[in-house]
Amino acid sequence: MTKIRVTVWNEYRHERRNEQVKSIYPNGIHRAIADHLEKVDGLEVTTAVLDEPDHGLTEARLANTDVLLWWGHMAHGEVRDDIVEKVRQRVLEGMGLIVLHSGHASKIFSRLLGTNTGMLKWRDDGEVERLWVVELGHPIASGLGEYIEIPQEEMYGERFEIPAPDELVFISWFEGGEVFRSGCCYRRGQGKLFYFRPGHEMFPVYHQPEILQVITNSVFWAAPAQAAKTSYGRVAPIAPVVHP
């Protein structure tokens, strides 16, 4: 049967320049995510990085992608505008897009949301983050408990300068008291867009099972309806975490 075709895109810069990041993600953040998704029934997974020709996002690659995951941080400005426009057009045609962590400042996120700021509060102290599930019945929250606790993370805080999401799945709370809209769903044209905040490169967030579960769920949610319908299965969700 037809599988959902997933492309995991990453700048792949931090992992090659910072030894601490390399120790956490020796093959890159894209591979950490892709290695998990490749184990999920119904998905066909490939990866692409910034320094490949056309950033790995050729017309052929985009035409054969149902869901694109985007991780960017230090090189947003190096992404060519013509490639951004091709990605935007594919989203309008129905391709799903999942923007991770600092991708809030990417050209594609800004262009699709109609804002060029994405401003927010920020602090990188390795704080505990409690990611509250505010829509327990949403498909992206399938298999989760009331919240996910991340031992160390970079703080993002409101005000987050984005349009009000169509659906809000997660709100984060940090030790300093800040809160943040961390799981935002949008629809643009025929495509679905999900912004998911956790994932700072200095911490092993993409090795945490609950975070990988959210990413898995979001892929199935964001996939075009026909691709999701013909996909023959999916990984069993993790056991819900019951907190005292």
Image (cartoon, rainbow, N blue to C red):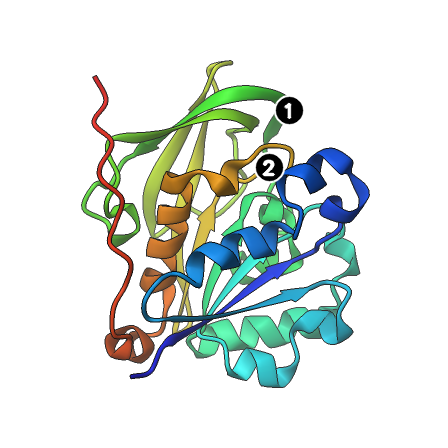
Amino acid type indicated by mark 1: Asp
Q: Earlier in the sequence, mark 1 or mark 2?
A: 1
- Count of numbered badges drawn on the protein: 2
Q: Is 221 left or right of 127, judged from the image as shown?
A: left
Across and down, in percent, residue 9 comes to: 60, 62
Within the image, what quadrant is residue 235 found in? bottom left
Q: Gap in Å between the C-alphas at discs 1 and 2?
A: 9 Å
Q: Residue at x 39, y 41 (%)?
A: 209
Task: Tell me the tag on residue 176.
Answer: none
Q: Residue furthest top?
A: 176
Q: Residue at x 54, y 28 (%)?
A: 153
Residue closest to the eye, 38 or 148: 38
Query: What secondary structure is found at the residue carrying circle 1?
Result: strand
Return the residue at label 1.
124
Q: Would you place residue 188 above or below residue 149 in this image?
A: below
| Proximity of marks 1 and 2: CB atoms separated by less than 8 Å | yes
Amino acid type indicated by mark 2: His
Return the residue at label 2.
200
Q: Residue at x 55, y 51 (%)?
A: 32
Across and down, in percent, residue 204 comes to: 55, 35
Within the image, what quadrant is residue 3 found in? bottom left
Q: Would you place residue 60 above or below residue 26 in this image?
A: below
Residue 201 visible from this viewpoint: yes
- Callout 2: few (<14), some (14-19), or many (20+) C-alpha neighbours within 10 Å? many
Residue 74 visible from this viewpoint: no
Query: What secondary structure is found at the residue carrying circle 2?
Result: loop
Q: Residue at x 63, y 38 (%)?
A: 24
- Callout 1: few (<14), some (14-19), or many (20+) C-alpha neighbours within 10 Å? few
Q: State the quadrant of the N terminus.
A: bottom left
Across and down, in percent, residue 72 comes to: 65, 51
Q: State the quadrant of the C terminus.
A: top left
